[in-house]
Amino acid sequence: MTKTSDTGRGGLTRRNILKGSAALAGAGLVTKVTGFPAIAQERVTLRYLSTAVNQAPDIAAKAAEDLGINIQYITVTTDDVARRVVTQPGSFDLVDTEYFALPNLMPSGNLMGFDASRIDRAGSIASVIRDGTVNGQAVGLDGTAPSEVLYLPEESATSFATEETGFLTLIPTTYNADTLGIRPDLIEGEVDSWAALLDPQYAGRAAILNIPSIGIMDAAMALEARGDMTYGDKGNMTREEIDATIEALIEAKRAGQFRAFWTDFNESVNLMASGEVVIQSMWSPAVTAVRTQGIQCRYQPLKEGYRAWASGFGLPTSIGEREKDAAYEFANWFLSGWAGAYLSRQGYYPAVLETTREALEPYEWAYWYEGAAAEQDIMAPDGRLLESAGATRDGGSYEERMGRVACWNAVMDENVYMIRRWNEFIAA
């Protein structure tokens, strides 16, 4: 893809115009009779639809400061993100959603592609997103790998291109390699396999994510690790594979294996922090949130590898031209370093590694990306102590973690059937 300049005549950029006009408007110096473009009349607001875990007031405040763009978060659940895209596309200007949802969202015709020529660093997006490789080595592509749904043949297309084009479905924001979270202070012995999620020694102290499309993949990782089953594609199971997986989960539930089934980020934090649960499906920021309370919590690397996911910005076709320009400005700003560094301190990975490295301190880059022991204390984005000097990141370097991805979050061909069976498991 071609990287193009955002600079217009006279050295003005859209970003400068947006920021400058917001400042003028705030000072009461811009009116409708000046002849200045309408964009100068007031700060533009982007209604940003996503789950709570993808929202950061600090990022919104920094964007307002740097760009003069207001970010207005709309917080919903994972399922409601998809529901709003399909049924209420006029209710938001930018959606932060996962790549695995795209096979269900794009056919609606309610999302449009991003023009790559307007994205400054489109060519620098991490290779694991662009082509499913890390340092030239292919990672596991079970499920809905971002590289398989990254491009559209044209801006208004409703199906995916099979090769790189000038239009991107989503501009990646964050991605990660998920694994099990554990309380090492409450667990005896070593946990090195997904099979531990179903190990009877943790009966009544285990939890699983109650988002069916993700929870069933964690269960599949556990069952395959235990030797119960071998899946053709854990991200796209046959009905027979779904039935066998659900029956195994029901058996485990009736034996008292699960303390809880969580759907909300805060639930997972509270379950782990309280000690009610010692092993569970977990997200990286939740591990961070537990640790910043001074409680031991490890994002445990497992020999079978990781279940990965990636999310990104999407544009509704109903977006106004002014908001669309602002959305491109915000996306370019998001890839320029500050946001990437902020998200890295939560344990996420950003789309563009080069700009993130420039925005992090060298000791932070070494800790988060190179697997090195921290030369200084590692602080969370809110300034609280996350790790003391000398600690190393769970799972090691970027290459060690993202290079060991086994599968990606997915929506299966048999999704409706799978959800019905999953609900039977929850109700059992």
Image: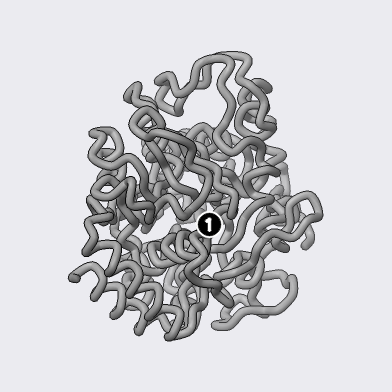
Q: Residue at x 56, y 14 (%)?
A: 389
Which quadrant of the view contains residue 74?
A: bottom left
Q: Which colour scheme is used?
A: one colour
Which part of the image, by quadrant, shows the N terminus?
A: bottom right
Location of residue 380 with respect to 182 vertically, above or below: above
Could you tell me which quadrant the C terminus lies in?
bottom left
Where is residue 364 shown, x and y percent of the image? 61, 25
User: What is the x, y in percent for residue 90?
Assistant: 35, 71
Rendered image quadrant of residue 292: top left
Task: Say what secondary structure mark 1 lies in.
Answer: strand
| Rendered position, 186 above or below 404 | above
Residue extending farthest to the left is 427
Res. 150 visible in picture: yes
Using the image as rendered, state which of residue 109 and residue 133 is in the foreground.
133
Give how far across and how far down residue 406 sits, in percent. Answer: 60, 60
Check disc 1 and give the amino acid type: Arg
Can residue 12 be seen at all in this image of the molecule? Answer: no
Nearest to the observer: residue 351 or residue 425: 425
Residue 211, image quadrant = bottom left
Give the class, few, some or many, for how many residues have Cα within 10 Å of label 1's Cα (few <14, many ≥20): many
Q: Which residue is drawn at 50% across and 41% down?
A: 300
Q: Residue at x 26, y 54 (%)?
A: 258
**Where residue 77 sits in the image (x, y, percent)?**
30, 59
Q: Mark 1 points at which residue?
A: 307
**Residue in front for this viewpoint, 174 or 252:** 252
Q: Please state if 356 lies on the left or on the right of 202 as rendered.
A: right
Q: Which residue is drawn at the image coordinates 56% and 70% (left, top)?
A: 144
